[in-house]
Amino acid sequence: MPIAQEGALFIADPAVIGATYSWTFTGSATPSTSNAASVAVEWSTPGNYTGTLTISRGGCSQIYTHNIVITQAVFAA
């Protein structure tokens, strides 16, 4: 499980030539959006969040949604 204040890597694998990617993440995610095939995201606070990836190519789109649980940071800030 990802931990607050530590990065989590999300990857569209395999990356599709000619496709566009659109990531969105809820809550305190940094970054909250990305157009790359892979993205490292960090949440500042624990909680339940959602990550959504939309892959588009040739007029077609596919949407993938993932529930993400972020636990308490190991060390207090």
Image (spheres, grey):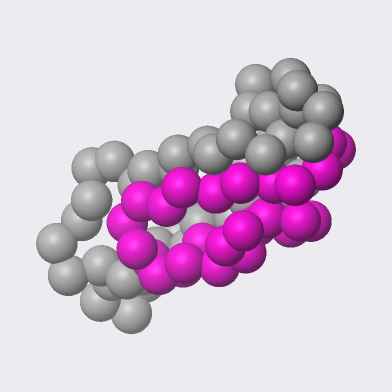
Magenta residues (range): 21-47
Residue at far front of view: 77
Q: Is residue 35 above or below residue 1?
A: below
Does residue 10 appear in this view? yes
Does residue 63 appear in this view? no
Q: Nearer the viewer, residue 30 or 57?
A: 30
Q: Which image quadrant is residue 52 in?
A: bottom right
Q: Is residue 31 magenta?
A: yes
Q: Is residue 77 above or below residue 38?
A: above
- Residue 21 located left or right of residue 18: right
Q: Is residue 34 magenta?
A: yes
Q: Is residue 34 above or below residue 77?
A: below
Number of numbered markers = 0
Q: Residue at x 47, y 67 (%)?
A: 34
Q: Residue at x 25, y 67 (%)?
A: 19
Measured as percent of width and height from the top left, residue 64 is found at 54, 50
Q: Nearer the viewer, residue 15 or 47?
A: 47
- Residue 19 located left or right of residue 74: left
Q: Residue at x 76, y 56 (%)?
A: 28
Measured as percent of width and height from the top left, residue 37 is found at 32, 56
